[in-house]
Amino acid sequence: MIRNPILPGFYPDPSICRVEDDFYLVTSSFSYFPGVPIFHSKDLEQWEQIGHVLDRPEQLPLTHEMISAGIFAPTIRYHDGTFYMITTNMSMGVVNFVVTATDPAGPWSDMHIIQGADGIDPSLFWDDDGKCYYTGTTRFDDEAGSRQGIWCSEIDLATFELVGERHIIGTGAQVNAEAPEGPHLYKKDDYYYLMIAEGGTEHFHAVTISRSQSIFGEYENHQGNPILTHRHLGKGYPIWNVGHGDLVELQNGDWYMVCLGSRLSEGQHKLLGRETFLVPVVWEDGWPVVSKGTGKLEWSYPSPGLPSWQPVGHAVNDFKEPVVERFEEELGFEWNFLGTPREDFAKVDAGRLRLKLLKNALVPWEFDNTDGSVFSRISKIGKTKENISFVGRRQQHLDFQATVTVRFSPEENETAGIVVLQNDANQLRLEIAKGQEGNPVVRCILVISHCDQAGIQHFTEAQLGEVVAAPTQSEFTLQVKANGSRYSFSAGPAADEMQSVADEVDGSFLGSETAGGFVGVYIGMFASGNGQTKEKYADFETFIYEGFE
Ligand code: 6LW
């Protein structure tokens, strides 16, 4: 059975390709490093992460400053023995580039930057004659004024250069469609199909399609558009902002679409960001019908009937057992840094994750003095390339619990702990610090952004609770539990001696509908010298993530 979402948690803008019996799927990763997680499946039901496409600093220059910058919507394709992943790095400006590999688990090549390719959401399409075409988004002027459209150009993949004239091939199904983006071209039965996302990546998101018998158009919009959306289901429908899809044809001629959607907590909060869903597609009269019979994303679909298969490791969508990280070897694929790690601040060493106390902290700077729009915030990036000592994983369930043991003796204003992170200006931290009486304390800190009347963002920090530890205590068990958007924090010297630090905190402000941006919540471990880098580490042991719903 297909259980949706197939990739729970923040995995937006999915793209899929098939090579014989194997399916590969990639998603956006913004300012998290490594970037572009890549998943493998043979049955479309279980998905195993096989790596990250961008796992070397030179492939992925990022800063940590603006979490929703970095890598936007990738496309994965396979042609003639080579895998291609094409995407945009917003932290380099708007730079579109391709990396290639013969093994999708890596290594992937260095970046091949496509000069002259403006806009976001690049995709590649090979025609029957072997020519390859680039599609992306752009602003252009016509008699209707300045607007966004989809452009297409031939590309030479020997030199990674655009060839010949570029053509505007689509502007969306709706008149003055908001944000036509995420284009992909397909060819079926003598038609080129241009499938795009439109309506913006929020409540009005949608997948629409047009077709033409010639690659540069003119494309005829489908009368049945949008072919997938949840915008007409009203607010509060449990899966929201459905759109940005990519199609795949199975070995047996069946078709499926991967797309993004968000599960809502309490009917309105998008804490998990945008997740990856899978939906069956049939073709009728030359056009795709998505989720035939209901027309909306369902929580499950019957098995596609592919040969049975067991992943080699752990399927990323299997949470029957708690996910336990013992930090015995390298960090598992679920762990990320914020920005490109340029310093050696995280060591996995004999059952411990050692995080060095760097001078930077997860302090709110991101919203300071900018308006709320992601793009105006992106324009402010580039202040610092210094790291934050942070390692985190996605919150993948509306209800979950995470527990970790930390060895740390705080001095001066040093801190270490765990954080529920949407972005620098919207977070809940459970941190060990030196208290006013000199004892170590564990305190819960809330950081929340708000907008003033002029539309400028600010933030507030507040302490929500504190427990005081014995003067010599240096081992702490920290736990965060979520029940919908209520987060509870507890701490103690051992797992069976826990005390509440802050209970049932309203974490709804961590939803992207108010916090802004394109990411979902992470649960991270951090350490900071708060102003000073120290040759000192906080040691984290046995991180247990349990997902309930
Ligand atoms: C992405 C665009 C979108 O590039 O949001 O949902 C942007 N669609 O296609 C960031 O994910």
Image (cartoon, rainbow, N blue to C red):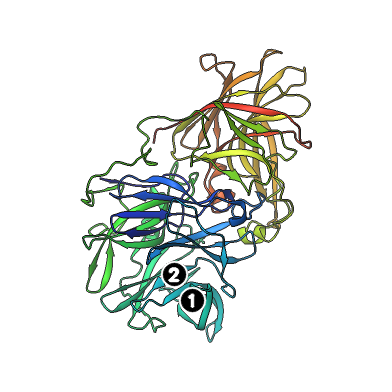
Task: Mark 2 and mark 1 in contact? Answer it, CB < 8 Å.
Answer: yes
One can see residue 543 in this view: yes
Q: Position of residue 335 (x, y in %)?
A: 53, 40
Q: Position of residue 312 (x, y in %)?
A: 35, 40
Q: CA distance from mark 2 to mark 1?
A: 9 Å
Q: Position of residue 35 (x, y in %)?
A: 53, 51
Dot 2 crowding, Cα within 10 Å, few <14, some 14–19, many 20+: many
Looking at the image, residue 356 sits to the left or right of residue 269; the answer is: right
Amino acid at dot 2: Leu
Quickly name the residue at label 1: 155
Front residue of 192/78: it is 78
Front residue of 466/108: it is 108
Quickly name the residue at label 2: 124
Residue at 34% across, 63% down:
247
Amino acid at dot 1: Ile
Q: Quadrant of the C terminus?
A: top left
Q: Quadrant for residue 541, please give it.
A: top right
Name the secondary structure under disc 2. strand
Front residue of 519/535: it is 535
- Asked if 388 appears above or below 66 in the picture, the reply is above
One can see residue 500 in this view: no
Name the secondary structure under disc 1. strand
Q: Quadrant of the N terminus?
A: top left
> Which label sits in the foreground, 2 or 1?
1
